[in-house]
Amino acid sequence: MAARGRLFRALPRARVSQNNGMYRIFSGIQPTGIPHLGNYLGAIQNWVRLQEEYNSVLYSIVDLHSLTVPRDPTSLNQCILDTTATILACGINPKRCFLFQQSQVPEHAELGWILGCFTSVPRLRRLPQWKIKDASQKNEGNVGLFTYPVLQAADILLYKSTHVPVGEDQVLHLELAQDIAQHFNKKYGKFFPIPRAILNSTKKIKSLRDPTAKMSKSDPQKLATVSLMDSAEEIVLKFRKAVTDFTSEVTYDPDSRPGVSNLVSIHAAVTGLGIKEVLHQSVGLDTAHYKMMVAEAVIQKLAPVRSEMKRLQQDKCYLQNVLKAGAEKAKELAAPVYQEVRRLEAELFAGLVLGLHSSIPACCSLGYSSSPPKSV
């Protein structure tokens, strides 16, 4: 992983509490199964560092977002607990942040509806992820898939979040949240902070079988993705089978040598070293031996995480209590914000009704015409 000083962009160290001119950080993860190596290096390690640097940090298991594809309720509940166990095992501390399940705070969905009324259909259609996912579903994507960026905006704005750690593929969705906040503020006065991105400098982790695509839990090729629950033997096998090229030397050139460069990125991320440093360590190794060096580094990094995950998965009550306690704390922040949004909406509506009523002749105010109806 990159050094801490390179992790944040334009985000100075500061205390965070009630967000009166201070920083509040929000991020979420979908419960779609055991997170993989890319999730860990690209997002979860970032979360761990942020909770140590800032005092108001919220992390949510965003189960409502996962409903955009059919889910079996039993499987979804297990995935929520598995995801919770994973991020706790990776170092998330419920005493340093609010960790909660999105659906346990109903204000998320309620604010999402209101913000949806500020968002045009053409604006959502322009988002490339909608186009890609809709095409993958033969242009039969559901309404939830279409509008989930609005719910994402509600997740962020509900807590008056000032900063959001995002990957490059989510920057456009954050820009939508910024646009919605600006539109709301223009209508009601300054209310929501305009959330800013925290971009992670860790290189995106790619598939081991197709280094032009990102690592994904849904990849049909079993050797493409390293799960955080993989055994040492499984990790070795996956790296041994990793796609590289016919050049034996280890170099870093993502454009012309994406496979080897992906291995270098993984090696740098799990050791905390820079690209140049890991390349220096690999001098004299061919790619076959380098694959085993990277596999060993990954095994060492994930071994304590895997052990703690197994322990936590045996204590379902603890995991449920963590999420329940986190939801109660999150509600304390969310409820006043949502109630204020409702108040502003009600005042505007009352003003419109009052203005409309005053401009209508008294004889029309009950729905009567000012002249007798014509006979048919």
Image: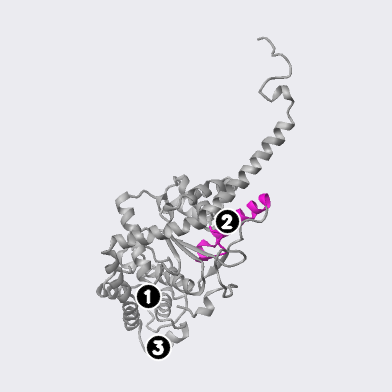
Do the residues under discs 1 and 2 have CB atoms within 8 angstroms?
no
> Is residue 131 shown left or right of residue 347?
left
Nearest to the observer: residue 81 or residue 136: 81
Decide whether residue 183 is among the magenta residues.
Answer: yes
Q: Nearer the viewer, mark 3 or mark 2?
A: 2
How much space separates mark 3 and mark 2, taking CA atoms?
A: 43 Å
Asked if residue 299 is positioned above or below residue 327 in the image, the reply reads below
In the rendered image, which quarter contains the C terminus? Answer: top right
Count neighbours of disc 2 (C-alpha within 10 A) and say few if under 14, some if 14 to 19, many if 20 or more.
Answer: some
> Is residue 207 shown left or right of residue 335?
left
Who comes first in sequence, dot 3 or dot 2? 2
Residue at left offset 28%, top offset 76%: 236
Q: Within the image, what quadrant is residue 320 found in?
A: bottom left
Residue at left offset 60%, top offset 58%: 178
- Name the residue beneath numbered marker 1: 244
Q: Which residues are magenta?
A: 159-188
- Name the residue beneath numbered marker 2: 176
- Residue type at numbered disc 3: Gln
- Name the residue beneath numbered marker 3: 281
- Residue type at numbered disc 2: Leu
Direction top: furthest residue: 375
Task: Indicate the position of residue 323 as horizontal and vertical percent values.
Answer: 38, 59
Determine the main secondary structure of the stretch shown in magenta: helix
